[in-house]
Image (spheres, helix red, strand yellow):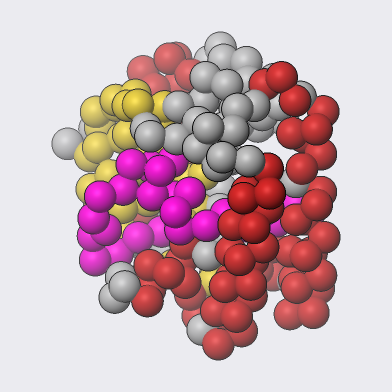
């Protein structure tokens, strides 16, 4: 299991966040510090992830082991990544370590913010969150999860969102290929509008867009 730790600053850039609403869901949150830092800003922030079922000691170990393991994809596809947002690899590593530390502290002191669960069946009522964020799960793993799963997952994210869902990135992990079934899946969503929007973040080459789904 890979439990990635991303920072609040990365979330701000990936999702082009200017201000946060009163309630936000991070799905799947992994070992990221976004929920902890959003909560510190007064936001009703919740993260959901299957990793939160792990016993505390096992979760700590998994998060720590995931820090170097996460670099394996980058090393394998070096030509598919750019460093202008981070500046240099050492800065990215520093941000990930700090994010992991912040996450592990918060999950210990405020475990109610970290809910075990996974798509396409989330343990929340309809329209629970004003904003739902999904980082590096949908479309990123389109070589693992098929079109049917993606459609079910998107409908579930819309179900628990009161206003908006944002998903990043929109290319397959590693070499960054486009997702062939993306347009067809979006066409099957009812009661929403969909927009693909540029964001001020790029790490995978060409992965500088997010999907914004707004309830109508």
**Residue drawn at (80%, 52%) of the image:** 68
Quarter where residue 23 is shown:
bottom left
Q: Nearer the viewer, residue 129 or 97?
A: 97
Q: Is residue 5 magenta?
A: yes
**Residue drawn at (64%, 26%) of the image:** 81
Q: Is residue 101 magenta?
A: no
184 w.r.t. 58: above or below: above
Relative to 34, 117 lies left or right: right
Q: Nearer the viewer, residue 6 or 88?
A: 88
Quarter where residue 97 is shown:
bottom right
**Residue drawn at (41%, 59%) of the image:** 25
**Residue drawn at (44%, 54%) of the image:** 9
Range drawn in magenta: 1-25
Q: Position of residue 37 (x, y in %)?
A: 43, 69
Quarter where residue 164 is shown:
top left
204 w.r.t. 157: above or below: above
Q: Position of residue 149 (x, y in %)?
A: 58, 33
Q: Nearer the viewer, residue 119 or 107?
A: 107
Can you name the residue that lies furthest to the bottom here? Answer: 109
């Amino acid at each position: 299991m890979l439990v990635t730790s991303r920072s609040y600053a990365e979330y701000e850039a990936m999702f082009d966040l200017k201000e946060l609403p009163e309630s936000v869901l991070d799905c799947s949150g992994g070992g990221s510090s976004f929920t902890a830092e959003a909560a510190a800003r007064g936001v009703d922030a919740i993260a959901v992830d299957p990793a939160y079922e792990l016993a505390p000691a096992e979760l700590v170990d998994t998060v720590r082991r995931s820090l170097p393991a996460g670099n394996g994809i980058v090393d394998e596809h070096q030509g598919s990544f750019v460093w202008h947002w981070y500046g240099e690899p050492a800065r990215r590593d520093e941000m990930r370590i700090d994010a992991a530390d912040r996450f592990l502290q918060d999950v210990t002191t405020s475990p109610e913010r970290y809910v075990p669960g996974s798509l396409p069946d989330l343990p929340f009522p309809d329209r629970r969150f004003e904003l739902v964020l999904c980082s590096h799960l949908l479309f990123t793993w389109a070589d693992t999860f098929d079109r049917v799963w993606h459609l079910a997952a998107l409908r579930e994210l819309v179900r628990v969102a009161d206003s908006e869902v944002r998903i990043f990135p929109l290319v397959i992990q590693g070499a960054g290929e486009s997702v062939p079934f993306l347009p067809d899946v979006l066409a099957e969503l009812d009661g929403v509008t969909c927009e693909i929007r540029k964001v001020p973040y790029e790490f995978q080459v060409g992965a500088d867009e997010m999907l914004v789904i707004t309830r109508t």
